[in-house]
Amino acid sequence: MNTTTAPQVISPEQLLKHWQGHRALTRHVIEAFPEKDFFEFSIGGMRPFSKLASELLSIAVPALKGIVNRDAQPYSEEATETLTTKAQYLQKWDEATEEINLYFKQIPVEDFEKTFNLFGQYEFPIIENIFYFIDNEIHHRGQGYVYLRALGIEPPFFWTRE
């Protein structure tokens, strides 16, 4: 009887690099918006991209802090400070990128399969919560691509990761 386990497919370091690659691309999308349109342009009742970026900022770092500290604080987009310029968003984005690196590396590999009640609402294994952070960002970045194209702006190539 063979009792060996399957090899790990992706390491935590590779997952973090993958996530940060998506964050780099989302940063390029933020940069591509004209200042006014970043805050005002929308299609079909969707939120402006600044609001989508605020949501992403209010999830990633607070969620990772919660996971690391096992503190299931409720989600609040209002907890993110009010940013009024694209430059402030880019600065906050860069700060969050560094915080993600810091907190992500504090999650022991054996904890990725442990269940955590994220924001006191989402009881899933930690790895699934992290996949959600990435998937949610990709979803909202797709909305940003639609906005940019509607504005006549060529969005960054989707495979850009730096």
Image (cartoon, grey):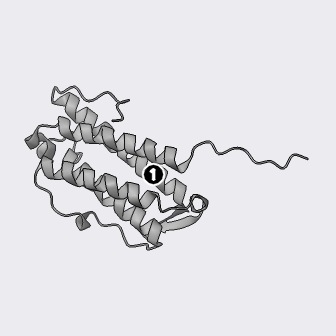
Residue neighbourhood size for the residue with mark 1, other residues' Cα within 10 Å, grouped as few (<14), some (14–19), many (≥20): few
Kindly indicate the quadrant of the structure image that contains residue 153.
Answer: top left
Q: Residue 93's spot in the image, x, y percent? A: 25, 51
Q: Amino acid at mark 1?
A: Tyr
Identify the residue at horizontal 27%, vertical 63% (top origin): 77
The x and y percentages for residue 89 are: 19, 51
Q: Of all residues shown, which one is farthest toward the left?
A: 36
Read off the residue under disc 1: 132
47 and 105: which one is in front? 105
* Total number of numbered discs in the rendering: 1
For the C terminus, the quadrant is: top left
- The residue sitting at 15% across, 30% down in the picture is 151
Q: Is residue 158 above or below residue 8?
A: above
Q: Is residue 48 left or right of residue 24?
A: left
Q: Going by the image, does 106 lie left or right of 59?
A: right
| Residue at disc 1, secondary structure | helix
Residue 154 image point, x, y percent: 22, 25
- The answer to which quarter of the image holds residue 72 is bottom left
Residue at 35% of width from left, 64% of height from top? 62
Q: Residue at x 10, y 42 (%)?
A: 35
Of the pair 109 and 75, the residue shown nearer to us: 109
Seen from the viewer's position, the closer of residues 7 and 26 is: 7
Residue 121 visible from this viewpoint: no
